[in-house]
Image (cartoon, rainbow, N blue to C red):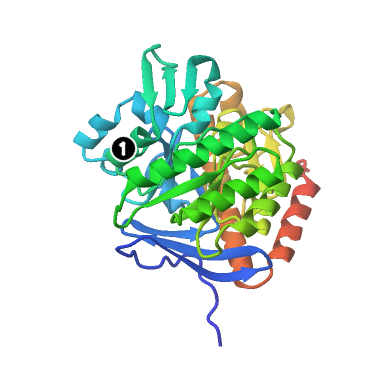
């Protein structure tokens, strides 16, 4: 008899970076990534720690919620405290007291969002800091060098991300440049035992360009592949169509990471397409603005109907923020602009995201992912229940 799936178990770390595809249910995939600093259970949600902190959270709390890996950002950490300083202090893991895996985004998305402050050409990106206006240059080689100084476990190639909608000619130019940069990043990364460099598929909302990008990256035989340039203004249907076009091209034995996504519904549907890894600032950003994600859909705790509601956000959750604080108190904190309100709601939201991932993994293991997806969406559709 096959033993029941236990999502609390993590495979032992390995000296080399390895992806183990353990089971599929339709296109949904259950697996693990093992490396020296620990194991990542997939599908995985990576809390975003842009500048070395998951906003409003202690990292011990983040770990206790079930996170196996967090994300840092090359662009922001380059500006402050600076990669050389981080290296002198023992690396990012030691600095922030997180001994588990860290993925660093190369900064391509931030470069896109700062388009008025940058110049881009084949050599890389020259940009002015949004902090003090100083000019910096980041080449593909420098991006990998910075990520090495940070000592991150999964390093992303430098790419050019194009906001949608965009002209096809511009999308193609950026995709082809990103492919050339991927080759340079691979050379710069070299052989780093126990670590990995991922390429990033670009191509906007044009299926043929997505396929060409995926084929080019596959030829580089990288340790993992990300899909970038989505959730940047296009409808969800377009995002899913791009995934359907892209993922069959990528090798099944390598992990697949959808960057910057997203809502719980985005995650469910992308898992159904075959994605293994996600990151998004949404849980913490929404929490700081009074929005909670729950089993019954979204709850705006600012609404007056919560002012005298003694119920918690979720009495069945194992997270104290979800279970032990009344909606009335959360409402008061948020309306009074007290920092504790954002802290508690961020804690709750990250707990919900990790509970969702745990449910997804268990459902795939049991061969009932489609049912789990339908049941979860049905609960969201019911909406939050007013107090009696």
User: Helix, strand, or loop for circle 1?
Assistant: helix
Residue at horizontal 33%, vertical 62%?
16
Q: Is residue 250 left or right of residue 266?
A: left
At 49% from the left and 15% from the top, the residue drawn is 117
- In the depicted structure, whether residue 388 falls above or below residue 233: below
Asked if residue 295 lies left or right of residue 60, the reply is: right
Write down the residue under mark 1: 145
x, y percent for residue 91: 26, 40
Say if residue 329 shows up in the picture: no
At x 61%, y 60%, the residue is 360
Q: Residues within 10 Å of mark 1 (few under 14, many from 20)?
A: some
- Image height of 374 relative to 385, above or below: below
Q: Quadrant of the C terminus?
A: top right
x and y, in percent, of residue 306 in the image = 69, 33
Quadrant of the image occupied by residue 174: top right
Residue at screen point 43% across, 56% down: 223
Q: Farthest residue toward the bottom? A: 1
Q: Position of residue 245 (x, y in %)?
A: 69, 52
Asked whether 39 or 204 is in front, the reply is 204
Left or right placement of residue 8 versus residue 296 in this view: left
- Is residue 230 visible from the viewing direction of this image? yes
Q: Position of residue 21 (x, y in %)?
A: 52, 68
Left/right of residue 313 with respect to residue 12 in the rendered view? right
Mark count: 1
What is the quadrant of the N terminus in the image? bottom right
Viewer-closest of 165 and 62? 165
Q: Is residue 216 above or below residue 360?
A: above
Quick one: which residue is furthest to the left in this view? 88
């Amino acid at each position: 008899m096959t033993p029941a799936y236990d999502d609390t178990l993590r495979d032992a770390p390995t000296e080399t970076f390895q992806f183990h595809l353990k089971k599929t249910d339709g296109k949904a995939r259950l697996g693990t990534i093992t490396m020296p600093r620990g194991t990542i259970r997939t599908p995985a949600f990576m809390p975003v720690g842009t500048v070395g902190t998951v906003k409003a959270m202690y990292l011990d709390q983040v770990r206790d919620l079930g996170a196996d890996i967090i994300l840092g950002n090359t662009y922001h950490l380059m500006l402050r405290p600076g990669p050389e300083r981080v290296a002198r202090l023992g690396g990012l893991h030691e600095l922030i007291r997180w001994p588990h895996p860290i993925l660093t985004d190369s900064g391509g998305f931030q470069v896109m969002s700062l388009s008025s402050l940058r110049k881009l050409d084949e050599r890389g990106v020259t940009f002015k800091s949004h902090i003090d206006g100083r000019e910096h240059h980041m080449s593909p080689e420098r991006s990998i060098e910075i990520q090495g100084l940070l000592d991150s476990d999964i390093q992303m190639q430098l790419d050019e991300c194009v906001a949608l909608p965009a002209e096809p000619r511009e999308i193609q130019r950026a995709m082809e440049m990103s492919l050339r940069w991927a080759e340079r990043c691979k050379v710069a990364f070299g052989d780093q035992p126990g670590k990995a460099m991922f390429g990033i598929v670009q191509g906007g909302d044009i299926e043929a360009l997505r396929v060409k990008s995926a084929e080019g990256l596959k030829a580089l035989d990288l340790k993992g592949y990300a899909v970038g340039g989505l959730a940047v203004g296009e409808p969800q249907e377009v995002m899913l169509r791009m995934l359907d076009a892209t993922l069959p091209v990528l090798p099944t034995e390598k992990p697949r990471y959808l960057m910057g996504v997203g809502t719980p519904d985005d995650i469910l549907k992308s898992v159904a397409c075959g994605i293994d890894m996600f990151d998004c600032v949404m849980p913490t950003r929404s929490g700081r603005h009074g929005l909670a994600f729950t089993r019954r859909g979204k709850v705006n705790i600012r609404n007056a109907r919560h002012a005298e509601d003694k119920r918690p956000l979720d009495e069945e959750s194992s997270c104290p923020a979800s279970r032990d604080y009344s909606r009335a108190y959360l409402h008061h904190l948020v309306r009074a602009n007290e920092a504790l309100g954002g802290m508690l709601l961020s804690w709750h939201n990250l707990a919900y995201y990790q509970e969702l991932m745990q449910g997804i993994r268990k459902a795939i293991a049991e061969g009932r992912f489609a049912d789990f997806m339908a049941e979860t969406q049905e609960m969201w559709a019911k909406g939050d229940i007013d107090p009696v």
